[in-house]
Amino acid sequence: MLSVNGIDTYYGLSHILFDVSIRVEKGEIVGLLGRNGAGKSTTMRSIMGLTPPKKGEIIFKGEVITGKKPYILFRKGIGYVPDDRRVFADLTVDDNLEIVYRREETWNKERVYSLFPALYEIKNRKAGFLSGGEQQMLTIARALMGSPELLLLDEPTEGLAPLIVKDLEEQILKLKEAGISILLSEQNIKSAMKLVSRAYVIDNGRIKFEGTRAELDENEEIKRRYLMV
Ligand SMILES: Nc1ncnc2c1ncn2[C@@H]1O[C@H](COP(=O)(O)OP(=O)(O)O)[C@@H](O)[C@H]1O
Ligand SMILES: [Mg+2]
């Protein structure tokens, strides 16, 4: 589904990612774990064409997509939920969903609302008045309207109350059941461990570990050195 092969990414002259490689197979949730500043968001931005890598290659469904524009990748079936939860504050929840380009109808508003019933309840509210958890649901819902085959979720649970996090975890698992492949970045592995089948640990822009959830769970050193446990 997705294969990131040895990418190097810069912000201006700052070299941020070093030889990062990641694979996501069809239908799996893969974790990209690491502490604040490790390079998780930069990896997501590199894939999505927002900060294209200077070296290496990114392949989606057999096609080289390195450096392609975000809207093109969205139309190819990559949904991106950035860490800033930005919504169109002056538009209602419903209109935030309505304006999304649709490449196919696998997902529509009815299906999105059935996944997020709480959003249906507030569909006529201006998005600027939503709580953090509601905004996060709306940004995920908006990505779903593009009927993605791959979803990039950048720290979806960050800063949210435990009950909301629990809801989100269940919703993310439902997305997997619906056949969507997911690359999920998280700082705190507790939430990620409930969701992922495999994980990568990134630190200082380098991949330090790659393995199954069980292998990570057993690796006390990696957890102690690079993750908050
Ligand atoms: N726009 C930017 N310009 C320069 N440096 C940046 C920018 N965004 C992030 N960085 C730096 O890149 C590194 C990786 O950041 P980031 O990918 O956001 O990490 P994470 O998402 O894991 O917290 C950090 O050292 C951060 O300071
Ligand atoms: Mg980040």
Image: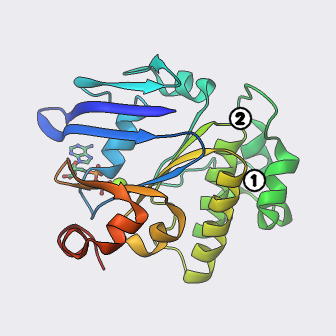
Q: Secondary structure at mark 2?
A: loop
In-front residue for pair 46/120: 46
Which amino acid is tagged 1? Val
- Kindly tell me whether mark 2's CB lies below 8 Å from ligand 2: no
Task: Give yes or no for contact between labels 1 and 2 (Cβ–Cβ under 8 Å).
Answer: no
Q: How is the image coloured?
A: rainbow
Identify the image quadrant of residue 122. bottom right
**Above or below, comparing residue 198 to residue 99 in the picture:** below
CA–CA distance between discs 1 and 2?
12 Å
45 relative to 156 in the view: left or right: left
120 relative to 87 in the view: left or right: right
Ligand 2 is found in which quarter of the picture? bottom left
**Above or below, comparing residue 208 to residue 21 in the picture:** below
Which amino acid is tagged 2? Val
Q: Position of residue 2 (x, y in %)?
A: 46, 33
Q: Position of residue 160 (x, y in %)?
A: 52, 74
Residue drawn at 25 percent across, 39 percent down: 20
The label number, if any, that marks residue 100 in the structure image? 2
58 relative to 166 in the view: left or right: left
Q: Which residue in the protein does label 1 denote?
A: 93
The label number, if any, that marks residue 202 in the structure image? none
Q: Is residue 158 visible?
A: no
Residue drawn at 71 percent across, 36 percent down: 147
Identify the image quadrant of residue 218. bottom left
- Numbered circles on residues, count: 2
**Above or below, comparing residue 109 to residue 106 in the picture:** below
Q: Earlier in the sequence, mark 1 or mark 2?
A: 1
Q: Position of residue 59 (x, y in %)?
A: 42, 25
**Above or below, comparing residue 66 to residue 93 in the picture:** above
Q: Is residue 177 visible?
A: yes
